[in-house]
Image (cartoon, helix red, strand yellow):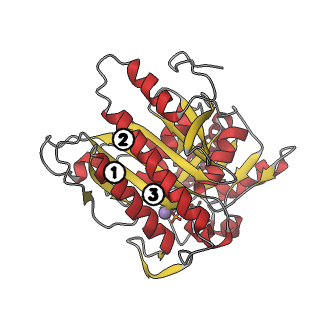
Amino acid sequence: MQTENTLALPVGITLDRFIKSQQDAFPYATGELSQLLRDIALASKIINREINRAGLIDITGALGRDNVQGEAQQKLDIIANIRFIRALVNGGQVVGILSEEDNEITQTNNHYAKYVVAMDPLDGSSNIDVNVSIGTIFSIYRRISPIGTPATEADFTQGGRKQIAAGYILYGSSTIMVYTTGKGVNGFTYENSLGEYFLSHADIKMPKTGNIYSVNEAYFNEFPNYIKEFIEEMRQKSGCMARYIGSLVGDFHRNLLKGGIYLYPPTRKAESGKLRLFYECYPLAFVIEQAGGKACDGREDILDIIPQKIHQRSIIYLGSDELIDNLEEKIKTHNHLMIKQLELV
Ligand code: AHG
Ligand code: MN
Ligand code: MN
């Protein structure tokens, strides 16, 4: 089914032509966002090449130091970060970059550029050494700081609803780039021998419900009761399947196409969840909403969260419309009971 705001374009056209035709549909478009999307695609091709060679050259394994989150940086994390930053600096459309791997915003010195980019250059890094799918996540905002000056934190902390575009690249059994500019979601599969992305998944719509739940069940005992109950209910569904790669992009992409729910609830160790708001939660929430699914943290839609700091984490539930509704209902009932208990004290 084609949404009314998505251009009817045939599966098989190149990403470049797709971007161009989207741009042509807007008489005042300057082509800068189009160029930025091309730069991201180019960077992903370079990462794709590095990943495919990873077993042959000495770029797997840990680097021996931690990133700003206190997590061990893998060599490919760093390579992906450098490659992306370089592509965005050279492309000239970005004034500032917020990366999972860097404490501070990177200034590109393109002070006349209109956009800033938040990114997780390599997601699922613990899977690098064992040939399991990994990904890249990106999110684009129009800057609010004056043209001609460096980027500021305020350019990034505008809130998820201000994203101009967002998406991910999944380096899986094939490499696919999926993104939205707020007019539906499209996926482009990479054809290695031609070095091109081709439209393969036009106007992706997430199934209204699904049988898959994706959560790290090793933490089951640490989850709040409403999450335990929700998981138990999922398990009772006929045809229910538990699927958890431990690569958010991979888990997300599968559920987006097949229907299901991804959960990263609070645990005793991580009360605010684990995933990062700016370069994991906001962009995937934008994509899932555009595909007809939902994203929330149990209190509000992810895109409505008012951000506090650039590397903050968030609890996240990403899923088919009906499953998120069920979960929210459960959370509401739980909160209601809690209030009642407090009233009795
Ligand atoms: P990153 O590799 O960018 O640090 O992200 C890892 C994330 C995400 O990809 C994955 O879904 C999640 O961490 C897995 O966490 P657990 O091992 O706690 O399940
Ligand atoms: Mn990640
Ligand atoms: Mn990462």
Taking the view exactly as shown, the residue that stands out farthest to the right is 238
Q: Nearer the viewer, residue 230 or 289?
A: 289
Residue at 31 percent of width and 34 percent of height: 32
Q: Amino acid at mark 1?
A: Leu
Judge: label 3 CB < 8 Å from ligand 2: yes
User: Answer yes or no: do the residues labelled 2 and 1 have beta carbons within 8 Å?
Assistant: yes
**Classed neighbour count for the residue bearing mark 1: other residues with Cα under 10 Å, few (<14), some (14–19), many (≥20):** many
The image shows residue 166, relative to residue 267, as above or below, that is above
The residue that label 2 is drawn on is 36
Residue 299 seen in render = no
Disc with the residue nearer the chain's start (2 vs 1): 2
Query: Are there few (<14), some (14-19), or many (20+) residues within 10 Å of tag 2?
Result: many
Please give the name of the residue rendered at 37% of the width and 59% of the height, measured from the top-left corner. 99
Q: CA distance from mark 1 to mark 3?
A: 14 Å
Residue beneath label 1, please?
A: 88
Q: Which residue is mark 3?
A: 120
Q: Quadrant of the N terminus?
A: top right
Find residue 269 and report its horizontal and vertical position in percent.
53, 72
Q: Secondary structure at mark 2?
A: helix
Of all residues shown, which one is farthest toward the front?
193
Q: Quadrant of residue 312?
A: bottom left
